Image (cartoon, rainbow, N blue to C red):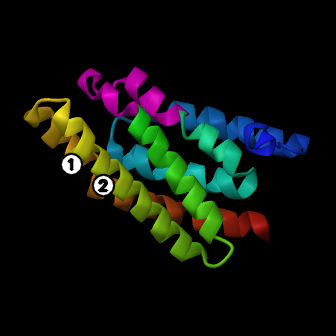
């Protein structure tokens, strides 16, 4: 349990990579107010962090984009209750990818995207629909459904050549 809670950055190089990725992932939602731009970039960054630094650090970074999207205006104020679900969805994606990737990269990307999508869409449909008015829930249901699946897969497509180049 202590290993899960402690950061294992390792080398100075790993610390520098983590810092750079953390900075980038915080800035993306501030500059790009489009789910089809931010989603793939953030998902690719989370997958890259998982491979380059580790899953604990990637989960930590997965907490930042939704907060920055909210602060930067990409996620409107009435959608603030979705923040924890986005964070958990990112963690699900990272941990699924981390667990399955040693067996097959593309299966890991596909399952990670599918599980993230299922959790986030299910959260909207089953939890938030009971807490919000139907118009807002409908808008949120679209944002948290198939776009989550596609942006996670696109993130994997972006991450793959970068990981491959770094490994060589």
User: Where residue 35 sits: x, y (%)?
Assistant: 34, 44
Label number found at residue 4: none
Q: Is residue 48 left or right of residue 37?
A: right
Query: From this viewpoint, is residue 114 visible?
Result: yes
Give percent across and percent down for residue 154: 44, 62
Q: Is residue 111 left or right of residue 119?
A: right
Disc number for residue 147: 2
Which residues fall within the magenta stretch?
Answer: 64-83
User: What crowding class fits label 2: few (fewer than 14 Cα within 10 Å), some (14-19), or many (20 or more)?
Assistant: some
Q: Earlier in the sequence, mark 2 or mark 1?
A: 1
- Residue position for label 1: 142
At horizontal 33% and vertical 41% (from top left) the residue drawn is 34
Q: Residue at x 32, y 28 (%)?
A: 81
- Say few, some or many: other residues with alpha carbon within 10 Å of mark 1 (under 14 / 14 to 19 / 20 or more): few
**Quadrant housing the C terminus:** bottom right
- Vertically, is 147 above or below 88? below
Q: Residue at x 74, y 44 (%)?
A: 4
Residue 55 as seen in the image, left or right of residue 2: left
The answer to whether residue 75 of the structure is visible from this angle is no
Q: In what quadrant of the picture does the N terminus appear?
A: top right
Q: Quadrant of residue 73?
A: top left
Task: Give x and y (percent) for residue 53.
Answer: 75, 50
Helix, strand or loop at label 1? It is helix
């Amino acid at each position: 349990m202590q290993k899960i809670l402690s950061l294992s950055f390792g080398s100075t190089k790993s610390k520098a990579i983590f810092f750079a990725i953390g900075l980038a992932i915080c800035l993306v939602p501030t500059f790009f107010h489009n789910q089809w731009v931010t989603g793939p970039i953030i998902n690719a960054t989370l997958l890259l962090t998982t491979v380059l630094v580790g899953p604990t650090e990637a989960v930590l970074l997965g907490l930042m984009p939704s907060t920055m999207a909210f602060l930067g205006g990409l996620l409107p104020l009435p959608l603030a209750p979705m923040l924890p679900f986005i964070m958990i969805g990112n963690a699900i994606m990272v941990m699924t990818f981390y667990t399955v990737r040693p067996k097959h990269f593309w299966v890991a990307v596909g399952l990670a995207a599918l599980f993230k999508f299922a959790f986030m869409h299910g959260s909207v449909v089953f939890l938030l629909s009971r807490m919000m008015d139907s118009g807002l829930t409908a808008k949120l249901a679209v944002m948290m459904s198939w776009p989550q699946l596609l942006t996670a897969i696109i993130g994997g497509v972006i991450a793959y050549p970068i990981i491959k180049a770094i490994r060589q």
